[in-house]
Amino acid sequence: SPREMSHAETLGVRKEGSTLPLEVSVAVSEISGRKFYTVIARDVTVRKQAEAAMLRANEELRRLNSDLEQFAYSTSHDLREPLRNIAIYTQMLGRQFGKQLPSEASVFVSRVLEGTGRMEKLLGDLLAYTQVLRADGDVPEQKPLVDAGAVADRVLKDLDRKSVV
């Protein structure tokens, strides 16, 4: 015989008068023209407590993500000025004393400029990342494509530089 089933949540009352959340399922069956009802009530206190804890944890995670975003933005922004000063003074050193510097020192000047350029790019990427995040902290659906070959080339060049110096 066809069986109808419905579910609902409600509050139940214990003998001593306190309330508890219940999930109630009712099944209706018909046998020989007579309707029969089966009622099952489940205490869902533990599930409700877990859901509330998860909501609190998600809210805390959103707050922490927002704080982290703000920190990353501030750090990226604040580090760019001293980095530019390093690059500017290194360029001035190279221009004013480049011909007087030993060839090894010229290589060091070039490496400092390359390093500040890479650091400027990393800080710019960090700043861009913080701006890409939406206000609710979720990453947008479309993620930017990354050229894995270019990343590998850059890593290999960095590793090669470290072995020389």
Image: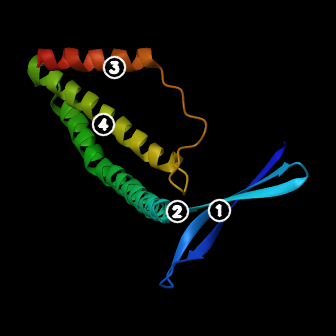
Residue at disc 1, secondary structure: strand
Q: Which of marks 2 and 4 is in front?
A: 2
Mark 3, Cα crowd under 10 Å, few <14 / some 14-19 / many 20+, is few
Q: Are marks 4 and 1 in contact (CB under 8 Å)?
A: no
Q: Quadrant of the N terminus?
A: top right
Residue 149 locus on image (x, y percent): 42, 14
In this rendering, position of residue 19 left or right of residue 114: right
Q: What residue type is labelled 4?
A: Met
Q: In this view, does 137 lie above or below 143?
A: below
> Between disc 3 and disc 1, whose residue precedes?
1
> Between disc 3 and disc 4, whose residue precedes?
4
Q: What residue type is labelled 1?
A: Val
> Which residue position holds label 1?
24
Q: How far is the residue under mark 3 from the one under mark 1?
A: 61 Å
> Foreground residue, 151 or 89?
151
> Between disc 2 and disc 1, whose residue precedes?
1
Q: Are marks 2 and 1 in contact (CB under 8 Å)?
A: no
Q: What residue type is labelled 2?
A: Val
